[in-house]
Image: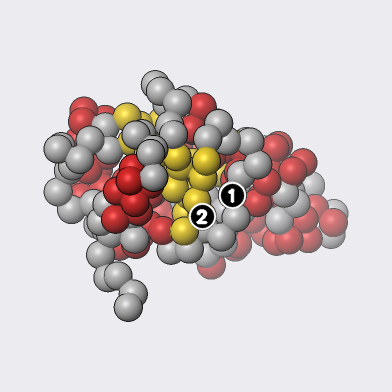
Amino acid sequence: MTKLTADLSYEQAAQARGANVVAGVDEVGRGPLCGPVTAAAVVLDPRRIPAGIADSKTLPFAQRQRIYQELLEVAQVSVAHATVEEIDALNILNASHLAMERAVAGLGLVPDHVLVDGNRLPKHLPCSAEALVKGDAKSLSIAAASIAAKVVRDRIMVDLAQQHPGYGWERNAGYPTKDHLAALLNLGVTPHHRRSFKPVHNILYQGIYITR
């Protein structure tokens, strides 16, 4: 039977196998046409878990902000990125894994086990690891990581939107929405766009080299 809400079952199972410190890892930003891909690693204190943790995509803006702030106060939280240049050089999957590896490395301690959202594991983790498909709906640690990664990346895109107005990044976070695609044609490609992604590549290939 599929679990409907995230809990600590996977963390507790790992601890029963001897892993004292278990981190959840998730990333956001694989689908956008621009900006970094961002990952977070979170080690929860089971005695101090913020209320309402769930897959970040299911939570309203204000609740994500509140939970993220609480996580900074009661959990070990590390957020890291892979740049647009790294995405174009490595491909988005490998860049996502690089961001995850950096997030785990940025924790204030080395975990004994890592729960990773998805069906593939980064190659360079300092401990045992477990891939969980739809992990942000199963593991509270992964769900917490999804919130941290999304809050931080969304803030980055809001800042970039101020530098490059017209693309709607403060609303679409760089995803290929109708207004973003229209702005790409009308305003051109910025240094923050991923040139290896087809809509951006096609514009460049067609000879529209406007850079703002």
Left or right of 122 in this view: 80: left
Residue neighbourhood size for the residue with mark 2, other residues' Cα within 10 Å, grouped as few (<14), some (14–19), many (≥20): some
Which residue has dot 2 on it? 131
Q: Return the residue nearer the eye: 85 or 145.
A: 145
Left or right of 41 in this view: 195: right
Q: Amino acid at mark 2?
A: Ala
x and y percentages locating residue 17 in the rendered image: 39, 45
x and y percentages locating residue 189 in the rendered image: 69, 47
x and y percentages locating residue 103 in the rendered image: 49, 33
Circle 2 — which element?
Answer: strand
Q: Return the residue nearer the eye: 72 or 154.
A: 72
Find residue 163 and name its label.
none
- Residue at x 14%, y 38% (from the top left corner): 47
CA distance separating discs 2 and 1: 6 Å
Which residue has dot 1 on it? 121
Q: Is residue 195 visible?
A: yes
Image marks 2 and 1: residues in contact by CB distance under 8 Å:
yes
- Residue at x 71%, y 56% (from the top left corner): 197
Image quadrant assignment for residue 5: bottom left
Q: Amino acid at mark 1?
A: Leu
